Amino acid sequence: TCGAPVWPNTTGWKALPGNGKASTGRQEKHRWRSNAWEPTPRTGKKNGRKRSLLVDARGVPLSLVASGANVHDVKLLQPTLDRTVLARPEPHPERPQNLCADAGYKGDPALQSVVARDYQPHIKQRKEEADAKRNQPGWKARRWVVERTHSWLNRYRKLLVSFEKTEASYVALLSLAAALTCWRQTIVIYG
């Protein structure tokens, strides 16, 4: 084997997961993109979990949906609105039912889901809320109610970082925490 390399180039070695030995197989070379303005392809998935909440004006959870963190918020809107634990009162023109959401729910699919369920959508970006608070006296932002409920759920250390193996067990723990949150808010209301 005169002139043939016995060992492959050491700069192309890739560590194998877990055993501490280097692979001696040939590695696929990464090709340069033909156009520098093309987006870089993703190499991995987003790990973790995401929860979507529907709360009332006081922050009491009415609906809860959990999924993987790689699912967009808009895909969770419809199941969240459909899985309320209480029977929703009929919307009335004198007392409309408002739905406040952040900019992640902007767009036609989310708007159609909200309007189909007879909610009045209030979907604003943070900048729009800050401008409205500055320019309209007495105007209050309402999205913080959901953020506060997320904070209440994060106080349960078991939920802050999810180590559950199945989504069903994670949803069960979230439901228990939401029930405790409802109970604590009821004590505040009815004393």
Image: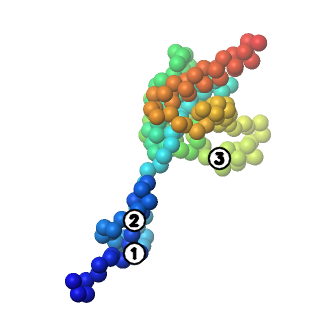
Q: How is the image coloured?
A: rainbow
For the residue pair 161 and 136, the one nearer the viewer reads as 161
Q: Position of residue 95 (x, y in %)?
A: 61, 21
Q: Is residue 182 visible?
A: yes
Label 1 SS: helix
State the residue lying farthest toward the top: 190
| Of labels 2 and 3, the one closer to you | 2
The residue pinned by badge 1 equals 10
Q: Position of residue 110 (x, y in %)?
A: 47, 38
Is residue 138 toward the left or the right of residue 84 in the image?
Answer: right
Which quarter of the figure has residue 9? bottom left
Q: Position of residue 114 (x, y in %)?
A: 49, 32
Query: Label 1, label 3: how many angstroms apart (C-alpha)?
Result: 51 Å
| Quadrant of the image containing the N terminus | bottom left
Label 2 SS: loop
Which residue is painted at 56% across and 45% down in the image?
A: 103
Q: Amino acid at mark 3?
A: Arg
The residue pinned by badge 2 equals 22
Is residue 18 placed above or below 123 in the rendered structure? Answer: below
Which residue is painted at 75% across and 46% down in the image?
A: 134
| Quadrant of the image containing the C terminus | top right
